[in-house]
Image: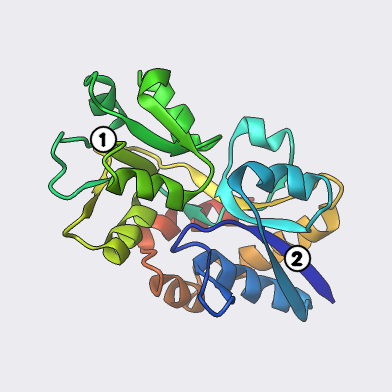
Amino acid sequence: MKITIGYIEEPPFYWTEPDGSVVGADIELADVVLRAIGYTHIEHQPTTFEELLPGVSRGRWNMNVPLFITPERSLLVDFSTPVWALGDGFLVAAGNPKGLDSYAAIAHRNDARLAVISGTIQQRSAQSHGVRDTQILQFARQEEAIDALLAGQIDAYAATALGNRVVAERVGSALVAAVAHTGQDCPPVGAFSFGKHDNRLREAVDEQLKRYLGSADHRQRMAKYGLTPEEIDPIVGHSMNN
């Protein structure tokens, strides 16, 4: 049995190694779940964030790596049970010279510029907290946003706090720092997504996820990528109630 997963480059969740292999927390989770279903040949299709939902909904591949669930996205695809809960954060220049620790902090400074990946939940969150469109620079890929930060074209890059911690470790503390947002309650959850024509696959994935999420093996595998009980515990209760 063969299946293809659409993914983007966003450590620690999914990325391509120099040898061409695709790895990451969500890639490993998908591998465990899909092999439990019976899939023996798992392929990974690189794409952009903007193409993830159209690609799976048009049948170009079978499922997407997890991304945040929103009502708008649910009109285009069907989501699995949630697999993590993640708060937002910024990647900033070392020392955080403008003291940016929330979207409100960006909105309060006319000289602050924020990078986002087009169409992400972070873009909408920034706008809902008063960040003006003139302050927001949109990019198609994470590496482009990071390059802009290193070049001094922006003051902060908005993504998940966990993802930013991993990027900061990779780039180096002499250049960048990861800053978790202050005052976050009930972080949003993310899940695998499927075309609305593929209920059988979604139901099979859900069945395995509900058995596996929160298990010792799951926690051990996710810990390798920096996911802690803070990101896992909220969705374990969610999956048991669905």
Residue beneath disc 2: 4
- Please tell me which residue lies in front, 20 or 13: 20
Q: Quadrant of residue 38?
A: bottom right
Would you identify the image quadrant in which residue 44 lies? bottom right
Task: Out of 222 and 44, give the one closest to the viewer.
Answer: 44
User: Where is 241 relative to 96, above or below?
Assistant: below
Percent across and percent down for residue 15 are: 52, 65
Q: Residue at x 76, y 50 (%)?
A: 56
Q: Coloring scheme of the render?
A: rainbow
Q: Is residue 110 above or below residue 94?
A: above
Q: Position of residue 206 (x, y in %)?
A: 69, 59
Q: CA distance from mark 1 to mark 2?
A: 38 Å
Please state which of residues 156 and 123 is positioned toward the viewer in this rendering.
Answer: 156
Residue 174, can we see it?
yes
Q: What amino acid type is highlighted by mark number 2?
A: Thr
Which is nearer the eye, 50 or 144? 144
Compared across the picture, whether 4 is left or right of 110 comes to right
Which mark's residue is nearer the viewer, 1 or 2? 2
CB-based contact (under 8 Å), mark 1 and mark 2: no
Instruction: Using a 10 Å C-alpha cutoff, classify the residue at mark 2 as few (fewer than 14 neighbours), some (14 to 19) or many (20 or more).
Output: some
Instruction: Give the quadrant of the N terminus.
Output: bottom right
Residue type for callout 1: Gly
Rendered position, 232 above or below 179:
below
Q: Residues within 10 Å of mark 1 (few under 14, many from 20)?
A: few
Q: What residue is pinned by disc 1?
A: 183
From what the image shows, is residue 208 above or below residue 67? below
User: Of helix, strand and loop, which one carries label 1?
Assistant: loop
> Horizontal and vertical percent for residue 77?
73, 42
**Visible in this render: residue 87?**
no
Q: Residue at x 63, y 76 (%)?
A: 32
